[in-house]
Amino acid sequence: MAKFNFENSPSPPLVQGVMPLPEALRQGTPVGPRLVGGTSFAGKSAIDLAQIQILAQACLQGLDAARQVVFGWQRQGQSLEDIYIQGITPCARLLGDWWCSDRLDFAMTTIASAHLQQLLHDFSAEFLQESLQQRNGLSLLLLTEPGAQHSMGLFMLSEFFKRSGWVVTVAVPQDVVDFKKLFVSDWFDAVGISISTDRHLGTLQTLLPQLREASDNLNLQVFVGGPMAFTAPELLKGLPAQLIAEDAPETVACVTRGMLLSSARAT
């Protein structure tokens, strides 16, 4: 996913841990262009930090409030791809930043993140139709690391792969045993693993070569990414897999390009 730096983000006032919501959001009024960050999007400018903060605040209020922010961005001309990359992705990181700095407690962060992830599910059909391509004959398994608590980024990535013509399976293994079963559960052209912590790096370094050898596909491509690809990419370089540290569209393009090159060399 794209990297955004919120280290200097203005902190919300300590009124129940969050900034006050705009009046229109509190009353359930659709959010218009002047309310969403105060910009007009002439020439479809990027979603700015002020607007990302408004989405985060809306997620803390409720799902309907969060939807109103997205609807407002759409009325301003933003595509769902823009909203996913420039709005939802950095919003998730901002919520995490607020939690790490004790501006939100765990319960509030969990609720807001759940609302943010629900937005992806709610807009899935519309997103896939924005530029849906024909099936390319490639299949992909996307996995979190064993026992992961969050899968929003992986789900978003799966949406971009689906829209590019891939057949995608998304799984959240509960433990290493479950991870191994899922890895070899079917024929896949590629497997992507999202890694958020260093808990299983040693296990994966040993396990991935074994799983590739046990796979039905002798040319299986394996790549890794996720939060650690940005916070500590040097720790992932020891894994027997390609490191991907781009945003979702670039990840899809990179993996697809690699598959096509691999197929061309095989023929």
Image: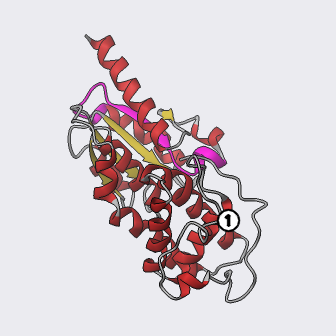
Specify whether 214 is left or right of 146: left
Q: Secondary structure at mark 1?
A: helix
129, above or below 212, in the image: below
Q: How is the image coloured?
A: secondary structure
Q: Is residue 65 visible?
A: yes
**Residue at point 41%, 38% (across, down):** 208
Instruction: Using the rendered view, name the quadrant where residue 91 is placed.
Output: bottom right
**Callout 1 crowding tier (Cα within 10 Å): few <14, some 14–19, many ≥20:** some
Quadrant housing the C terminus:
top left
Residue 129 in the image: state x and y as whole percent. 28, 49
Q: Residue 116 versus residue 39: which sits nearer the camera?
A: 39
Instruction: Using the rendered view, name the quadrant where residue 211 is placed.
Output: top left
Residue 228 part of the magenta segment: yes
103, above or below 139, in the image: below
**Residue at point 52%, 43% (across, down):** 247
Q: Residue 213 versus residue 125: which sits nearer the camera?
A: 125
Check disc 1 and report the residue beneath it: 50
Amino acid type of the residue that numbered disc 1 sits on in the rendered structure: Ala
**Residue at point 35%, 42% (across, down):** 161
Residue 257 in the image: state x and y as whole percent. 40, 25
Give, as a single range, the part of the protein colored magenta: 213-231
Residue 262 in the image: state x and y as whole percent. 35, 19
Residue 225 part of the magenta segment: yes
248, above or below 152, in the image: above
Q: Is residue 144 visible?
A: no
**Residue at point 60%, 72% (across, down):** 35
Specify whether 136 is left or right of 114: left
